[in-house]
Amino acid sequence: MDQRALRAALLKLAGADALPASRFTAAQRNALDRFARHTGAVGCQRQGSGDVYRVLDAGVFAGHLAALSPQAHTPTPADLPPRARHIARSRASKAGEHQHACHYPILKAVGDGVCWQDGARGAVLALGPLTRDCGAASLRIEADDAWRTEQALWLVENQALFDRTDWLPPDTVATLLYYGGQLDGRLLAWLAGRPRASRIVHFADYDGVGLANFARLHALLGDACEYWLMPDWSTKLARYGSNRLWRDTLREFTAAAARLPDCLAPLTQQMQRCGLALEQEAVWLPGW
């Protein structure tokens, strides 16, 4: 039996004398019908021009509802964290909208004098000394905060590029942000909320996932962001590219291709022509 559909159906029916069948989804009606056959606690009856569900055995109904939703009849405090509320209601923290409101990206300074400022609060994050002493740092970011930096912000997909920075163009002074595979929606909303850096550079794998992430970023920021192409990228794609990676991310590539700026046409055309994708770490390999 679909426990999620049954829980939702029982919660709708709780405290009601009867509810029209139209108030339930098809999955919930199927779950209620099976529950009725197994327990006899509810029934579906004809009423007027339609069917209605009603509770037939309140004790059995309440017992099953409590097993599925421990606090179905107990109001939860308004300030209770959403995941705690989901556990109280359905025994699972991810049973509803469960993304946290705040996001904590991992940041690293490259070069001297890199810092972040929140002018609205007079707050400063001196990222250079923190990187030197601790290796990295973080900010609590929300879409409406005022954090920004006067230097560039580079978004990198893989940790190797975050750990070792000798691949960057000479004399780079910037913040590196490691995001690990997928750009978080809260990070995208934060970047779109106001200008955050002098420029935003995205360096991802040259595959469907990397291009799909940039398409999402570019849809929000337009020309305020750029997709970085490593030196000798064309030669490296031909020499080190992977057909398996290309095939594994082809669906994402196909969906993203039409949303990419024209400047990436040489890259996407060569990927299509050769059936190859290239991982970021090729930036350290020779291009000849």
Image (cartoon, rainbow, N blue to C red):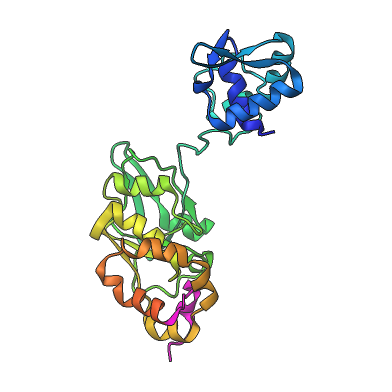
Q: Quadrant of the N terminus?
A: top right
Magenta part mainly helix, strand or loop?
A: loop
Work out whether residue 22 or residue 128 is closer to the camera in this orientation and state it: 22
Q: Quadrant of the C terminus?
A: bottom left
**281, above or below 177, in the image:** below
Which corner quadrant of the image does residue 2 belong to? top right
What residue appears at the point 43 percent right and 75 percent down from the top-left corner?
Answer: 167
Work out whether residue 200 or residue 233 is closer to the camera in this orientation and state it: 233
**152, above or below 118, in the image:** below
**77, above or below 162, in the image:** above
Q: Is residue 194 left or right of residue 132?
A: left
Q: Position of residue 180 (x, y in %)?
A: 51, 58
Part of the protein shown in magenta: 274-288
Work out whether residue 164 or residue 266 is closer to the camera in this orientation and state it: 266
- Magenta-drawn stretch contains 261: no
Q: Position of residue 65 (x, y in %)?
A: 68, 19
Q: Position of residue 207 (x, y in %)?
A: 45, 69
Q: Is residue 1 left or right of residue 193?
A: right
What residue appears at the point 48 percent right and 60 percent down from the top-left corner?
Answer: 132
Which corner quadrant of the image does residue 89 belong to? top right
Tell me how many marks there are.
Answer: 0
Instruction: Answer whether residue 89 is visible to the viewer in this image.
Output: yes
Q: Residue furthest front?
A: 49
Instruction: Answer whether residue 83 is visible to the viewer in this image.
Output: no
Work out whether residue 132 or residue 101 is closer to the camera in this orientation and state it: 101
Which corner quadrant of the image does residue 228 belong to? bottom left
Q: Position of residue 96 (x, y in %)?
A: 54, 33
